[in-house]
Image (tube, rainbow, N blue to C red):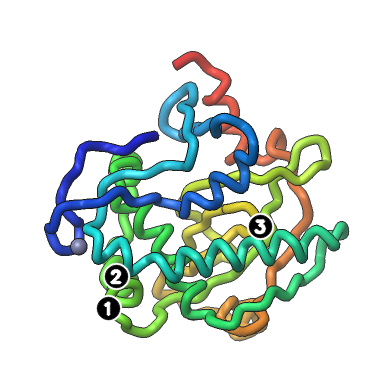
């Protein structure tokens, strides 16, 4: 999707440049030599084509630039995770991925969620961060402390027992009984525990705030069996 007409930066009101909701490198990693990606939606039938993922005019040049380092870091981390995961075939493993700058990983994760929520698609879906929006913006753009725990999973999506790479945009749900936001890029599925609930200390060893950071492998799940994926694939197959 090419984006909407230029608007004002959602943070400062200056004229916008184009912002990718998920760093474009992930779209290129999936697309490889194919001409385009197929983009499906939870709120409409059919699909659209995209060469480099979903983008729109959200941020001015200065605020967009503030995401550059953490985006690059997130892409590099996910590629390391992909390469290391390739050796693991059994579920139940923890895969330890080098993570020398955990804050950058946190910024990458929360900024993908933030960008999706404030985008036109996020608005169309009625998404909101509520009272969590300010601490997230303070962390991403104003250098305040990292506000929420992250857990990392190996992406489970598979088709006829083969793991497949997908991008799934952030959505709200529950994980380990805790309110969370979750999205998937090739190599890693990110669960951000954006809530006011206490983080159980027994899960502390799984939190992604250290070097190396653990990725939890819960095993493959066929996209035809998983209700969330199935719903979107069924909508893709229907007439627009
Ligand atoms: Zn701005």
Q: Element at badge 2?
A: helix
Residue highlighted by disc 2? 137
**Residue depicted at x 76% and y 46%:** 163
Mark 3 surroundings within 10 Å by alpha-carbon count, few (fewer than 14), some (14 through 19), many (20 or more): many
Residue highlighted by disc 1? 142
- Outermost residue, top side: 239
Q: CA distance from mark 2 to mark 3?
A: 26 Å
**Residue depicted at x 39% and y 63%:** 111
Which label sits on residue 187? 3
Would residue 64 be found to the left or right of residue 167 on screen? left
Q: CA distance from mark 2 to mark 1?
A: 7 Å
- CB-based contact (under 8 Å), mark 3 and mark 1: no
Give whichever of discs 3 and 1 has the lower sequence position: 1
- CB-based contact (under 8 Å), mark 2 and mark 3: no
Which quadrant holds the N terminus? top left
Would residue 138 be found to the left or right of residue 113 on screen? left
**144, 150: nearer the viewer:** 144
Give above or below for 170 relative to 225.
Answer: below
The quarter holding residue 159 reads top right
Query: Which numbered disc, 2 or 1, marks the residue closer to the eye?
Result: 1
Give whichever of discs 2 and 1 has the lower sequence position: 2
Would residue 126 be found to the left or right of residue 93 on screen? left
> Ligand 1 closer than 8 Å to the CB at disc 1?
no
Mark 2 surroundings within 10 Å by alpha-carbon count, few (fewer than 14), some (14 through 19), many (20 or more): some
- CB-based contact (under 8 Å), mark 2 and mark 1: yes
The quarter holding residue 214 reads bottom right
**84, 183: nearer the viewer:** 84
Q: Element at badge 3?
A: loop
Which quadrant holds the C terminus? top left
């Amino acid at each position: 999707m090419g984006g909407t007409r230029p608007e004002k930066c959602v943070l400062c009101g200056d004229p916008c440049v184009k912002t990718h909701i998920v760093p474009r490198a992930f779209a290129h990693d999936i697309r490889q030599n194919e001409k385009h990606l197929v983009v499906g939606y939870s709120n409409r039938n059919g699909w659209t084509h995209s060469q480099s993922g979903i983008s729109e005019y959200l941020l001015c040049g200065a605020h967009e630039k503030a995401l550059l380092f953490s985006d690059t870091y997130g892409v590099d981390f996910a590629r390391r995770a992909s390469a290391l995961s390739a050796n693991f075939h059994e579920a139940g493993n923890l895969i330890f991925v080098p993570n020398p700058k955990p804050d950058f990983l946190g910024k990458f994760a929360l900024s993908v969620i933030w960008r999706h929520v404030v985008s036109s698609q996020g608005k169309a879906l009625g998404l909101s961060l509520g009272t969590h929006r300010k601490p997230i913006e303070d962390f991403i753009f104003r250098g305040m402390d990292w506000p929420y725990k992250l857990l990392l999973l190996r992406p489970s999506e598979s088709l006829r027992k083969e793991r497949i790479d997908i991008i799934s945009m952030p959505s709200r749900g529950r994980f380990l009984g805790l309110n969370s936001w979750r999205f998937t890029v090739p190599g890693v599925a990110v669960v951000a525990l954006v809530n006011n609930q206490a983080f159980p200390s027994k899960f502390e060893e799984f939190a992604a705030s250290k070097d190396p950071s653990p990725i939890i492998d819960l095993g493959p799940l066929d996209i035809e069996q998983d209700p969330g994926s199935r719903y979107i694939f069924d909508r893709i197959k229907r007439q627009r």
